[in-house]
Amino acid sequence: MLTGFQHLHSALRWVVLFLLVWTLIQSRIGKSKGDAFSAKQAKLGLFTMISLHVQLLLGLTLYIGKGWSSMLGDSTIMGIAVMRFFVVEHLIGMLIAVILGTLGHSLVKRASDDTVKYKRQFLFFGLALVLIMASIPWPIRPGFEAYGWF
């Protein structure tokens, strides 16, 4: 079952990345044209946030199910780059990215000016995208090719 979650988590990252990029493009276009912040744009932000949360739930399931959570206090893990990445770096980077995405969506809903909505959406989802790109276990990272996940 964990293998299925791992494959789903790996595949869903492309949906998350697509939604983040699409949200950023649409918010930049909307701001540059001076368009009103539409319900369509708000729903795009909502679906992006939902996809981030689904990824988080799948990731936490894998984190606990694979036993990585029990390795947090183990000092020998910090010396192994691949294990440190999954036990600490991936978790923290993705948690912060999900928090930024959630903040972005929430702050957009609270803003009254359309320009501010576009700016906030672009800023927070953009920061989330940067963190996610830095925290994804890309196959070009040294040591990751041994896992055969890609």
Image (cartoon, rainbow, N blue to C red):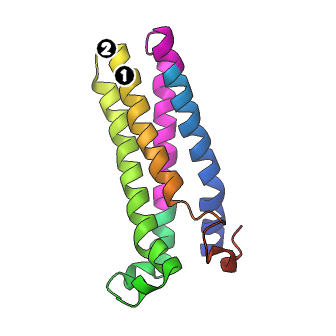
Q: Amino acid at mark 1?
A: Lys
Residue 11, percent from left and from top: 66, 56
Question: Residue 79 appears in which quarter of the rendering?
Answer: bottom left
Q: Amino acid at mark 2?
A: Asp
Q: Are marks 1 and 2 in contact (CB under 8 Å)?
A: yes
Residue 112, relative to residue 11: is it above or below?
above
Q: In what quadrant of the picture does the C terminus appear? A: bottom right
Residue identified by numbered label 1: 117
Please say whether residue 19 is visible from this viewpoint. Answer: yes
Q: CA distance from mark 1 to mark 2?
A: 6 Å
Residue 111, percent from left and from top: 29, 22
Main secondary structure found in the magenta portion: helix
Please report the residue visible at 63 percent of the width from the left and 74 percent of the height from the top.
Answer: 144
Question: Residue 3 appears in which quarter of the rendering?
Answer: bottom right
Task: Give 113 or 46, whichever is nearer the viewer.
Answer: 113
The local crowd at label 2, few if under 14, some if 14 to 19, many if 20 or more residues have their Cα within 10 Å, is few
Residue 50, relative to residue 79: is it above or below?
above
Q: In what quadrant of the picture does the N terminus appear? A: bottom right
Question: Residue 6 appears in which quarter of the rendering?
Answer: bottom right
In the rendered image, residue 35 lying in the magenta stretch gets the answer: yes
Please say whether residue 66 is visible from this viewpoint. Answer: no
Q: Which residues are magenta?
A: 29-57
